[in-house]
Image: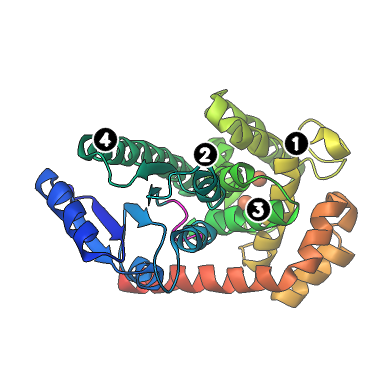
Amino acid sequence: MKRAYRILAVDDEDFNQELLQTLLEPKGYEVVTADDGKQALEILSEKNIDLILLDINMPVMNGYEVCLRVKEDPRTRHIPVIMITSLDSRESRLKGMEAGAEEFLQKPADQAELLLRVGNILRAAEYEDAFNYAIMALARAAEANDLDTGNHILRVGEFSALIAAELGQADKFVEDIRLQATLHDVGKVHIPSHILKKPGLLDAGEMEEMKKHPAFGAAIIGDHPQLAMGRDIALYHHEKYGGGYPAGLRGEDIPLAARIVTLADCYDALRNSRVYKPCYDHAGAYRIITEGDDRTRPADFDQAVLAVFKKKADRFEELYIKMTDQAAAQKRSA
Ligand SMILES: [Fe+2]
Ligand SMILES: [Fe+2]
């Protein structure tokens, strides 16, 4: 059975907390309460929360601040926030929107309206969640045939999001690339596994076969508008900055998302061992990307993307370690 949605009600007044509880609990929601912003953040770090109802004026940490923190943290930013404001002004709404709140309700909240908003926002979040889940499932299915592990695609997504954010891309772009970069090699489902798993270098014929995976990937993803970025990434992540395949595009003719993923994928591939190659530590991977070797040249990358990599190299190393340990721990506990 599906578990009840868990709503975090943050309000410094007991009376308001009780009001929300008596309204929401009979409708099957689980309500967790917090008296101030600091307590809310503590609860968020311990429990899975599906929705936050957030008061603005509170001691210790106000609602705007809580909302900002929630939206900054990759672990909580997907949780929708409804701000409940007694400050009936345009300014407080704008501040709330800037902090990333999805919805606003005026205090005292109209009960029917509150229930409708809560229901709608949870349903929308559920669809988004299911969409993200399906993308990940597709990406994982394609890996079954390959030597990469589940966390390769997750790390490539995370590195790509890091680069995009550093390049000053909008939040939407950053979130999209985090998810859709995982599809970069989805076309490999069509490549025979004796090629994917071959120890040693591929011969010319095998290489030709391998070079078809970007077009296969684009065909699998198709032309859904929500997945346009994923399609670009799958199709163009081997274009390099010129001289790659399949289209032989150059420079900025290659979509930015693909230019970003090229570097993210390269770093992660260098860190992992394969039957045909050893793995490198961070310093080794850094050296190859920034100085080149017989397979990789710094000129293969968008120079702005490369500059971000150099600047944020420590962060790449941290993320790699964190996301690899997690995978190992999950395997052990499975
Ligand atoms: Fe690829
Ligand atoms: Fe990859």
Position of the C terminus, as image quadrant, is bottom left
Span shown in magenta: 73-78
* Position of residue 45 measured from the top left corner of the image (x, y, whole percent): 38, 69
Does residue 8 lie above or below 138 as drawn?
below
Which residue is labeled 1 in the image?
255
- Amino acid type for the residue under numbered disc 4: Glu
Q: Residue furthest left?
A: 26
Which residue is labeled 2 in the image?
189
Q: Residue at x 74, y 67 (%)?
A: 312
Mark seen at residue 113? 4
Our reading of the magenta stretch's main secondary structure is loop
Q: Which of label 1 and label 2 is nearer to you?
A: 1
Nearer-N-terminus badge (1/2): 2
Nearer-N-terminus badge (1/4): 4
Q: Residue at x 41, y 57 (%)?
A: 56
Looking at the rendered structure, the secondary structure element under dot 3 is: helix
- Amino acid type for the residue under numbered disc 1: Pro
Q: Is residue 48 left or right of residue 299?
A: left
Mark 1 is surrounded, within 10 Å at the Cα level, by few (under 14), some (14 to 19) or many (20 or more) other residues, namely some
Label 2 to label 3, Cα distance in Å? 23 Å
Asked if residue 176 can be seen in this view, the reply is yes
Mark 3 is surrounded, within 10 Å at the Cα level, by few (under 14), some (14 to 19) or many (20 or more) other residues, namely many
